[in-house]
Amino acid sequence: MLSLSLTGLKLKNPLMLAAGIMGTTGGSLKRMAEGGAGAVVTKSIGVGPKSGHSNPSMVEVDCGYLNAMGLPNPSYKNFQGEIDMAKEGRVPVIASIFGAGADEFSEIAGSLRADAFELNVSCPHACGYGAQVGSDPNLVEEITKAVKSATNTPVWVKLTPNVTDIKSIGLAAQRGGADAVVAINTVRAMAIDIESGYPILGNKFGGLSGRAIKPVAIKCVYDLYETLDIPVIGVGGISDWKDAVEFIMAGAKAVQIGSAVGNNINIFNDISSCMQAFLKEKQWTMKDIYGMAHKK
């Protein structure tokens, strides 16, 4: 009832592990696959090893989590084994990759073996990477085109909400040949310790994730669905099955779950079973609810 085809990939359900959560090792990715995820996305991987920002790099706030990891990773040259192990979970494995420009993105995409690539042009707290690249439509189009030339596998572009008009960035990705867009990455934010007067995060600011950003993500997905001809994958604040259904009604072909995994390691199975019960009760199919908010 929940199975679908997404950019040529067969998914048993529309629920995916989002990048950055349980995606550092092949073992953890495999565990998420075996725990019910329809696909898994790795931690973002770059050209060279990167240690990331100094601690504290993640803190819980009233409305979710603030993180400023700084894209720590071992480099793509040391990560293929983790992807291969993750594939033992028998679901599509999507490699999240980042770079400072088109050459770095295409180098990684031309070397790693994954079922799809998710281009991280949206991390809000890594100097020279992420949103600093992804807020420029011309760069997004250039990078997407370069990656499409380097690989025959599907290419997804993960968009930042920290722009004036996310539709223009989505259109740039589409012009570059993207097979899908992912919306959204974290929202730029910070917290200050009132005892010392200093910012809490080691990087001073970071990205906000969790339930607080769901309404922002829903609006972005809604707008992108109306603007683009390629699928939109929704992410941001999904904590239960109702959230997942809301994203799909807004126009998400599938959804990714990140922060909520930390509170419930079985969340994929829980959401899929509740979604199936809901659809059965309503006598609806996935096709019925996809983009439903646009049909009223």
Image (cartoon, helix red, strand yellow):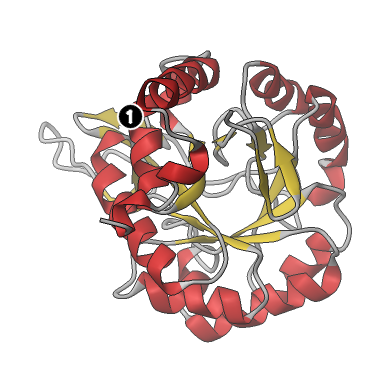
Amino acid beneath label 1: Lys
In the image, residue 114 above or below residue 48: above
What residue sits right under mark 1 in the picture? 242
Q: Quadrant of residue 192?
A: top left
Residue at the left extreme of this rendering: 194
Q: Say which element carries label 1.
A: helix
Q: Where is residue 104 in the image (x, y as percent from the top left)?
A: 74, 69
Residue at the bottom extreme of this rendering: 138
Q: Is residue 175 visible?
A: yes
Counting the numbered discs, the total is 1
Quadrant, the N terminus: top right
Q: Seen in the image, is 101 located left or right of residue 210?
A: right
Give the residue displayed 33% in from the left and 40% down from the top.
Answer: 246
Q: Is residue 103 visible?
A: no
Give the residue displayed 42% in from the left and 54% down from the top.
Answer: 251
How many neighbours does mark 1 have within 10 angstroms: few (below 14), some (14-19), or many (20 or more)? Answer: some
Q: Of residues 220 and 254, which is closer to you in this image?
A: 254
Q: Position of residue 67 (x, y in %)?
A: 40, 40
Q: Where is residue 132 in the image (x, y as percent from the top left)?
A: 47, 71
Q: Seen in the image, is 58 located left or right of residue 24?
A: left
In the image, residue 156 above or below residue 26: below
Q: Of residues 278 and 7, which is closer to you in this image?
A: 278
Q: Where is residue 47 in the image (x, y as percent from the top left)?
A: 76, 58
Residue at the front extreme of this rendering: 283
